[in-house]
Image (cartoon, rainbow, N blue to C red):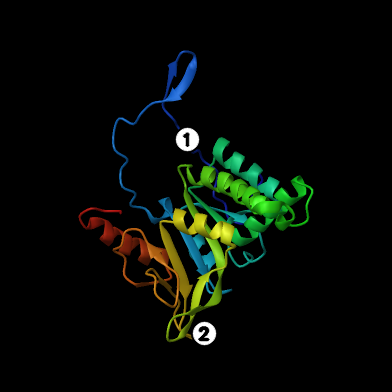
């Protein structure tokens, strides 16, 4: 795994251990002997960060615990981070395999941006099937193949014992009600990726600011005007766009009876 970095953090080791039992010559995973402990570190969760360009999404992700950026576009020049540039879907699959198999110190994987990565997946599936666009295969088969390929790889990555952060930009869409039309901020994700990413994410944070001179913050709860989400149900509606402050809020949320929902 080729990783570019400007700082001197030395790679350590992290390995995934799965308990198995041999039955009839076939190794099968054992059933768990105890409950999974609640996760208290924000960097252990699956998070979707979205917002308009240059609002600070990548900066916030860089504050996570030992992050590795899978960079699908330029935009990290002002940050001192470990990053792997990815330009194709096969390159992404190779990086995922390396993350799974190689010894390393990374604890959080950041995909910046997930929208571009989906485009790489789409291009790969189209090329593999000899078509220029998904719609060329009848009955929605092209779109289904792209969705399944994307789902397979992202789900496998999400099951590793690492935190996972998706970054994408925001779109403004018009939502019409019986009386008014509302401009709503939503993650800039294709339909085939939107459901998977938003459902998988424990937190959907809208990185926002009231105006260019205002302090930047994150929105954690959904409204008519934006998409957001907090699986704990206990975070404040707004938080400073700062990892330490968000972690403090999560600590307070986890102290409440029931913990994560």
- How far apart are the alpha carbons under marks 2 and 1? 44 Å
Give the residue at the far front of this rendering. 139
Q: Is residue 103 visible?
A: no
Q: Quadrant of residue 255?
A: bottom left
Q: Is residue 76 above or below residue 55?
A: above
Q: Residue at x 47, y 71 (%)?
A: 207
Q: Residue at x 31, y 47 (%)?
A: 38
Residue 200 lies, in percent from the top left, at: 46, 53
Q: Is residue 251 left or right of residue 223?
A: left
Q: Is residue 73 visible?
A: yes
Image quarter where the N terminus lies is top right
Q: Is residue 250 above or below residue 171?
A: above
Q: Is residue 139 left or right of residue 168?
A: right
Q: Is residue 54 above or below residue 114?
A: below
Residue that badge 2 annotates: 212
The circle drawn on residue 96 is none
Q: Secondary structure at mark 1?
A: loop
Q: Residue at x 56, y 57 (%)?
A: 193
Task: Give whichever of 243, 232 is nearer the camera.
Answer: 232
Q: Secondary structure at mark 2?
A: loop
The circle drawn on residue 16 is 1
Residue 184 lies, in percent from the top left, at: 49, 77
Q: Is residue 28 left or right of residue 116?
A: left
Task: Give whichever of 180, 104 is nearer the camera.
Answer: 180
């Amino acid at each position: 795994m080729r990783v570019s970095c400007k700082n001197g953090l030395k790679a350590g080791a992290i390995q995934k251990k799965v308990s198995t039992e041999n039955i009839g010559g076939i190794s099968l995973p054992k059933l768990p002997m105890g409950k999974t402990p609640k996760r208290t570190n924000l960097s252990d969760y699956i998070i979707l960060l979205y917002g308009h360009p240059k609002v600070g999404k990548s900066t916030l992700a860089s504050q996570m615990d030992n992050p590795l950026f899978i960079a699908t576009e330029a935009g990290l020049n002002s940050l001192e981070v470990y990053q792997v540039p990815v330009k194709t879907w096969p390159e992404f699959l190779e990086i995922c395999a390396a993350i799974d198999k190689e010894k390393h110190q990374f604890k959080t994987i950041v995909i910046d941006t997930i929208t571009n990565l989906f485009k790489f997946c789409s291009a790969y599936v189209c090329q593999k099937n000899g078509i220029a666009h998904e719609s060329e295969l009848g009955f929605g088969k092209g779109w289904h193949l792209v969705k399944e390929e994307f789902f397979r790889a992202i789900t496998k990555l999400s099951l590793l014992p690492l935190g996972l952060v998706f970054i994408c930009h925001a779109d403004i869409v018009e939502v019409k009600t019986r009386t008014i039309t509302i401009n709503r901020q939503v993650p800039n994700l294709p339909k085939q990726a939107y459901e998977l990413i938003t459902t998988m994410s424990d937190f959907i944070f809208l990185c926002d600011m009231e105006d260019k001179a205002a302090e930047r913050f994150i929105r954690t709860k959904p409204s008519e005007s934006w998409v957001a989400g907090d699986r704990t149900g206990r975070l404040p509606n707004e938080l400073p766009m700062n990892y330490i402050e968000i972690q403090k809020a999560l600590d307070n949320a986890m102290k409440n009876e029931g913990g994560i929902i």
